[in-house]
């Protein structure tokens, strides 16, 4: 019997994930909650058989195994906890919450309800990134001592709530940088991490008052992960020569590896293994990776709707983000 799922929020990312799950035919999408009539109409075109409602509360009238949540970040903590307390598993868009405290509340809610929780750290699921992780885990690169990661967009988000710190939790750091922080920790097996320093800018000016509604559009963060130094840079509205510039360079005592986007694309990546004077291509496009994080959660959910201790790692990612914002506020 197929899992019965609900979708709450059908913006751009929500619709992309809805399409991926519908194409997979791995679950029955029973209900879609979206208050905006335009977004609701788009969702109805993707899944004509789904029941359409306006709110999360209405989804609780359905007998669901899980809910995919794609709403503004400010709503995640309350909505996730309400879903979990109703005995329903959650797949939440990143960031899972605005702060480490909110993230911890959600994780503890999942533990208390004994329900499966996960979030959409989708870049883990690119073939390129998985091949690099295999090099790291098998020791082919030797001891990893440095990771340099960047995610620069040629434009910013198209929804106004992203620019309101009270709703989003921050700017490009929590929107894009959080992916890079997660990737670095994931590559290294989530060792103990220690924040070092950060700088953030808004329209070219150093950002200091993180309590204001002004959010950063450029950020640089440095932290230690085990014996490795991790440097993260991210931005909105940067000249990149394409839609984006994305890279993760991993350096070890026996070699290096790099993930990089192709021709400024958000979707096309290659992975390269570097030797001293040579290189080897590990992965190239095409690669349909966008919905894999969600499909992985669905697969795990089908095996048992129970709490997974690994989600405590979400708190550790959020703690680095929190530390960066606190550091900038105290400069």
Image (tube, grey):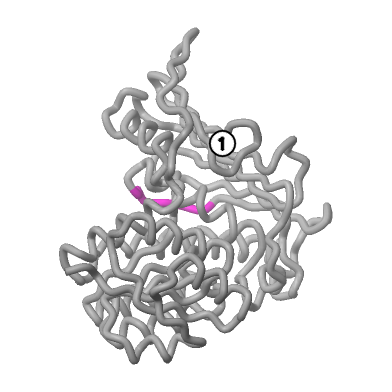
The residue tagged 1 is 247
Q: Position of residue 55 (x, y in %)?
A: 49, 87
Query: In the depicted view, which residue is nearer to us: 6 or 84?
Result: 6
Q: Does the magenta stretch include residue 80?
A: no
Q: Where is residue 111 in the image (x, y as percent from the top left)?
A: 26, 76
Give me the residue at 43% from left, 68% from top. Answer: 47
Specify the quadrant that holds the C terminus.
Answer: bottom right
User: In this rendering, would 120 be left or right of 108?
Assistant: right
Q: Vertical placement of 114 versus 56: above or below?
A: above
Stretch in magenta: 190-195
Query: In the depicted view, which residue is nearer to us: 251 or 64?
Result: 64
Q: Vertical placement of 253 versus 187: above or below?
A: above
Q: Is residue 193 magenta?
A: yes
Give me the residue at 36% from left, 41% from top. Answer: 188
Q: Where is residue 97 in the image (x, y as percent from the top left)?
A: 49, 71
Query: In the depicted view, which residue is nearer to us: 199 or 149?
Result: 149
Question: Image quadrant of residue 148?
Answer: top right
Asked whether the viewer can see residue 105, the reply is no
Give me the residue at 40% from left, 76% from top. Answer: 50
């Amino acid at each position: 019997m197929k899992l019965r799922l609900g979708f709450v929020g059908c913006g751009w990312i929500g619709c992309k994930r809805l399409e991926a799950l519908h194409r997979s035919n791995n679950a029955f999408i029973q209900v879609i909650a979206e208050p905006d009539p335009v977004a609701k109409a788009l969702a109805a075109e993707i899944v004509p058989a789904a029941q359409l409602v306006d709110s999360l509360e209405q989804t609780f009238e359905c007998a669901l195994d899980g809910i995919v949540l794609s709403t503004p970040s400010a709503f995640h903590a309350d909505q996730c906890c309400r879903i979990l307390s109703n005995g329903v598993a959650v797949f939440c868009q990143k960031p899972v919450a605005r702060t480490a405290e909110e993230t911890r509340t959600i994780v503890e809610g999942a533990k208390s309800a004994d329900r499966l929780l996960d979030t959409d750290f989708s870049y883990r699921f690119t073939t390129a990134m998985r091949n690099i992780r295999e090099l790291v885990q098998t020791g082919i690169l030797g001891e990893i001592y440095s990771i340099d990661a960047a995610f620069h967009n040629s434009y910013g988000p198209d929804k106004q709530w992203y620019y309101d710190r009270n709703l989003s939790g921050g700017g490009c750091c929590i929107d894009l940088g959080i992916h890079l922080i997660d990737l670095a920790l994931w590559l290294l097996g989530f060792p103990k991490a220690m924040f070092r320093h950060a700088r953030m800018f808004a329209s070219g000016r150093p950002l200091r008052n993180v309590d204001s509604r002004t959010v950063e559009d450029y950020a640089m963060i440095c932290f230690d992960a085990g014996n490795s130094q991790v440097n993260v840079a991210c931005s909105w509205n940067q000249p990149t020569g394409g839609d984006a510039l994305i890279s993760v360079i991993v350096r070890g005592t026996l070699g290096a590896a790099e993930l990089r986007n192709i021709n400024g694309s958000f979707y096309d990546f290659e992975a390269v293994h570097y030797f001293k004077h040579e290189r080897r291509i590990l992965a190239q496009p095409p690669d349909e990776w966008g919905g894999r994080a969600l499909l992985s959660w669905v697969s795990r959910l089908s095996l048992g709707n129970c709490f997974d201790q690994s989600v405590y790692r979400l708190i550790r990612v959020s703690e680095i983000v929190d530390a960066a914002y606190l550091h900038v506020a105290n400069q």
